[in-house]
Structures are given as structure tokens and as C-alpha cells.
Image (tube, rainbow, N blue to C red):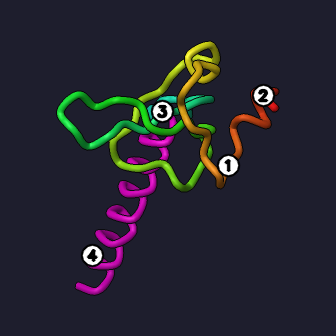
Amino acid sequence: MWLGRIDEAIAAAEQREAEQQQGEERRPPQPDWVVELSVRLGARPTEVHAGHCYAIGKRHRAISREQALAEGIRACAHCRPDTELGVL
């Protein structure tokens, strides 16, 4: 009886590990640049972040380097994407 329970627990643990590994393999790559969007109806860009920044809000989308260099969008004070982009 106990041997059956142990075998089931091992099989369940192996299944979870396989699913986790499969999820990591299928995860899309992290973007280089992200723009955070406003809450309003128009959803205008408010701040540019590096893709690895911890301060990215819930409303965001990936952008290209050229879009990240656009004038008038504030750079994040935490990840400092302006430094990485070469903007003084």
C-alpha cells in the first residue's frame, strides 16, 4: 500500500518537473526594450525600461531600439535605459 503511494508521489513530482522544464523552453525571449503605457484610454507611452528591469508595470509592450530612442519618453530611473542606449 505504501509502496503504491510512494510510486504515485514520485510520478507526480517527475510530471511537474517535466512540465516546468517544457514551460521554460517554450517561454518567449525577454525583450531588450519595453515601454510602459499609461492607464488612460489612449494608453500613451510613459516610460522606457530595459527588458530586465524589475520596475516594469503591468501595462507594457516590447519595442525596438529605434522606438526606445524616441524623443519625449522618460527613461526609467531604476534600470537607466538611456545609459545603455548611449543617450546622455
Q: Nearer the viewer, mark 2 or mark 4?
A: 2
Seen as rendered, the residue at the extreme bottom is 2
Q: Earlier in the sequence, mark 1 or mark 2?
A: 1
Amino acid type, mark 2? Val
Amino acid type, mark 4? Gly
Q: Which mark is residue 4?
A: 4
Q: Earlier in the sequence, mark 1 or mark 4?
A: 4
Neighbourhood count class around disc 2 (C-alpha, 10 Å): few under 14, some 14–19, many 20 upward: few
Which residue does the image show at 29% across and 86% down from the upper left?
A: 2
Q: CA distance from mark 3 to mark 4?
A: 52 Å
For the stretch drawn in magenta, the main secondary structure is helix
Q: CA distance from mark 1 to mark 4?
A: 52 Å
Local SS, label 4 = helix
Q: Nearer the viewer, mark 3 or mark 4?
A: 3
Q: Which mark is residue 87?
A: 2
Q: Which mark is residue 79?
A: 1
Q: CA distance from mark 1 to mark 2?
A: 14 Å
Residue segment shown in magenta: 1-25
Which residue does the image show at 53% across and 31% down from the upper left?
A: 73
Please give left or right for residue 25 compared with residue 7 in the image: right
